[in-house]
Amino acid sequence: MNIYVDFDDCLCETARHFSELVEKMFGKKVPYEGMKYFNLQKSFSLDDDQYEKMMIEGHTPEVLLSYEETPGAVETINGWIDSGAEVSIITGRPAGAYEASRRWLDEHGLERAKLYCLNKYGRENFVKNSEFSLELEDYYKMHFDVAVEDSPAAFKFFDHLPELKVMVIDRPWNHDTELPGDNYTRCFDWDTIRKNCAKCN
C-alpha cells in the first residue's frame, strides 16, 4: 500500500503555532478555532507585507522544528510502515524548508518515511532536479492508495486517482467544506484515520 500524508496540520500543529505567531508579531488575536480559511492571509486579515513577514518567520528552521506533533500521527505512520506500507510525506512547503522538515521527521521517529516538497504553487525558488523536489508532472506519475490531507485546496491534486481513499483530518478551515465524493472520509483524529485505513486493505 502506498500512502500520501500531508505535513502541516496533519503531522504537526502548524496553524496553532501561526495563531500565536501572528499575535506576537502583529497583535492580532485569531484563535485556532477561528481560523475559517485555509488561506492564512485571509484568516488573519493580513496585508501583503505582514503575510510575507509571517511566512518567512514561520518557515525558519527554529520555528519549523518547534511544531508539536498531531497526537497519534507518528504511531500510526510507523504502524503502517511496520506492516509493509510505503509512506510519502508530500508537503507544499518551499524547498528551502526541506532540511528542517526532514530533521523534524527524524527527531519524531519517522526516519523511514520519505519526504517530498511538491511545487504546488510555482515558487521561483523551488529546487529542481533534486531527490526531494517534485514538479506536478512528476507527482502525477506517482500512485497512492490512501491520502491524509486537511486542505480543500489540495483536493484537486487527487483527481487523477479515482480509486484513492482520502482521509480528511477535521480542521476549522474545512468544517463547512462539502467533500468531493464517497472516497473522501472526514476523520477527527489519527485513531479514526488508522481504523479507516485498515478497511482499505
Image: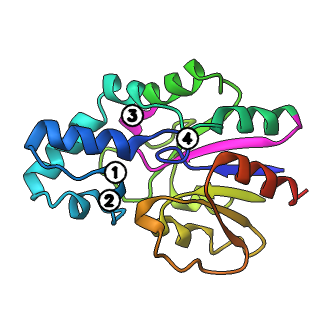
Nearer to the camera, 115 or 21: 21
Give yes or no for residue 101 being in the magenta stretch: no
Marks 1/3 in contact by CB < 8 Å: the verdict is no
Marks 3/4 in contact by CB < 8 Å: the verdict is no
Q: CA distance from mark 3 to mark 4?
A: 15 Å
The label shown at residue 11 is 4
Nearer to the camera, 84 or 13: 13
Labels 4 and 1: the sequence-earlier one? 4
Q: What residue span does the magenta drawing correspond to?
A: 83-98
Tag 1: amino acid: Tyr
Tag 4: amino acid: Leu
Q: Secondary structure at mark 4?
A: loop
Marks 4/1 in contact by CB < 8 Å: the verdict is no
Snapshot colouring: rainbow
Q: CA distance from mark 1 to mark 3?
A: 23 Å
Which residue is denoted by mark 3 in the rendering?
97
Which residue is denoted by mark 2 in the rendering?
35
Nearer to the camera, 109 or 101: 109
Foreground: disc 3 or disc 4: 4
Tag 3: amino acid: Ala
Which residue is denoted by mark 1 in the rendering?
32
Task: Report whether 77 appears left or right of 137.
Answer: right
Marks 1/2 in contact by CB < 8 Å: the verdict is yes
Q: Secondary structure at mark 2?
A: loop
Q: Secondary structure at mark 3?
A: helix
Using a 10 Å C-alpha cutoff, classify the residue at mark 3 as few (fewer than 14 neighbours), some (14 to 19) or many (20 or more). some
Task: Report whether 55 appears left or right of 27.
Answer: right
